[in-house]
Amino acid sequence: MVSACSCTSIDSPQFKRILEKCCCPSFLLAGGGPYLSILGVVYTDKFVVQRLTDIKWIGEATTHEDARVYHLARVFASLRLAVAALDKYYDEVSQDPDIPALVFNEPHPRFFPHPTKYEEYRAEANLEPKCTEFEYINAFRADPSNVTFLAKVKSSDQKLVIKFVDRYGVEAHQLLADAGMAPRLLYCGLLDGKNDVRNTGSPVQGSTKPGGLYVGPIRMVVMEHTEGKTAEEESTWPNDAREKIETAIQKLHNSQLVFGDLRGPNVVFSGGSVFLIDFDWAGRVNEARYPRNLSRRVKWPRKAEELEMKPILMDHDLFMLDQLFPK
Amino acid sequence: MFQEFLDRINDPAFEPDEEMISIVSELMPMTTEIHTLEDNALTKLRPLLTGLLGGYLGKVISTGSRTPDGMISKQLGDCIAPLVCTEYKRAFGEGGCDPSTQASYSIRGFLVLAEVCGFCVLLYLY
């Protein structure tokens, strides 16, 4: 029983202080009887809960349970270390003088993803890695599925686009960026900003399973921000827009690559240049596939349900090109 | 830390120590029992989870309608930060609610809605 308490409102300055510093990450253990699941929680501008494990059977079912005891102990041992890391995180964040005050309608780190630095990829292996720190400015879309953010390099005014992806056509992006037909790709790799997928022996590759399913770590993509408007936003398109995009698509096809998602939001007009963006689906012919849950509102080369998890063909790119830029 | 948690589970070289194995060995038969009262189950579960997670799993006292069954928290001066919240039922599905959804609402209630009166680290007697 409770012998005494003094009520403290969550709205009091004492509670607000930690909520104003960070997104209050925590773990949830939820279960009933011999079942338990582990979840992760953050509180940004919305409350986000993600299932970290399946619902685990934690009971005893037979007289031979050594393996289950061992596997379950591994899960709890891992959780224990994660909770200790969380404890340390709160110590650091509560004393960090660099976290700015929370100001209404101003960007603040607690609303954005935690990765804030990357080492720019350099093709020459003997160059020293150069770490760049950035701060987020805004989300590109104000909906819960947004994974793309506008950011700024801390030491300059250079703007960046930071994107979080699972599958990504890094080869296609690199090819078109080298040809000036896509924004310069600065980093694509683990969230620590240190392991670019293009480095030899990188552990970031993940693997592609039947149906084109990607199994591997979530990755961060950092690219230069291109000032301009998308073909969807811009009412007057350059006369040579089709020609330039056709050249870009042809360049991909000549290298046995496909783009897959050639729609207005993924074409940017910037000065006299035309860029392709969003290489999430791009990849090698016969390997790149459409994702699950294709939009039913877009006119694809075939019905959405017929294309989901099926290979992206070069003809599909040409169909989408003709649809976007009719001859 | 969420990713670190998952990475360790997926790392075949990661080994639990004997203390963890011993507590899990107690936890498994305890959760297999059918308990007559949820509070009885929680009374047995909390010390086991305290041992497994390395922090005191206390009961939350709140004026809110939804509060977690237990919480490991961190005191930061006069602030409280939640590390782990638990929601546990006698049987999965009891009460017609997925406990993971209930747990989500509980911590949301803790952070943004409820008036939290305190933690039973010292005050609550079982």
Image (cartoon, coloured by chain):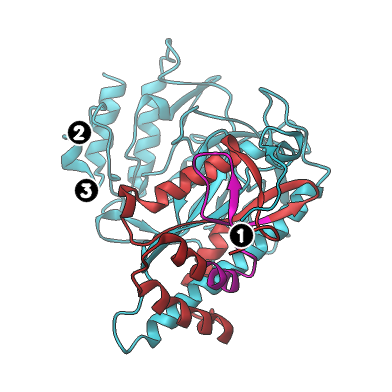
- Structural crowding at the residue carrying mark 1, measured as other residues with C-alpha within 10 Å and reported as few (<14), some (14–19) or many (≥20): many
Chain appearing in cyan on the rendered image:
A
Callout 3 crowding tier (Cα within 10 Å): few <14, some 14–19, many ≥20: some
Residue with the mark numbered 1: B58
Tell whether A133 sits left or right of A62: right
Seen in the picture, residue A78 relative to A235 is either above or below; the reply is: below
> Residue A262, located in which quarter of the rendered image?
top left
In the rendered image, residue A85, in percent from the top left (x then y), is placed at 66, 62
Give left or right: position of A283 versus B63. left
Q: Which chain is red?
A: B
Q: Kindly state the secondary structure of the residue where label 3 is placed.
A: loop
Quadrant assignment for the N terminus of chain A = bottom right
* Element type at mark 1: loop
Q: Residue A21, relative to residue A37: is it above or below?
A: above
- Magenta segment: B46-73
Q: Look at label 2 and name its amino acid.
A: Pro
Q: Position of residue B105 (x, y in %)?
A: 47, 43
Return the residue nearer the eye: B121 or A98.
Answer: B121
Q: Amino acid at mark 3?
A: Lys
Whether residue A134 is visible to the viewer of this picture, yes or no, is yes
Residue A319's label in the rendered image is: none
- Mark 2 sits on what residue? A301
Residue B6 position in % (x across, y down): 50, 64
Q: Is residue A263 above or below residue B61?
A: above
Numbered label attached to residue A310: 3
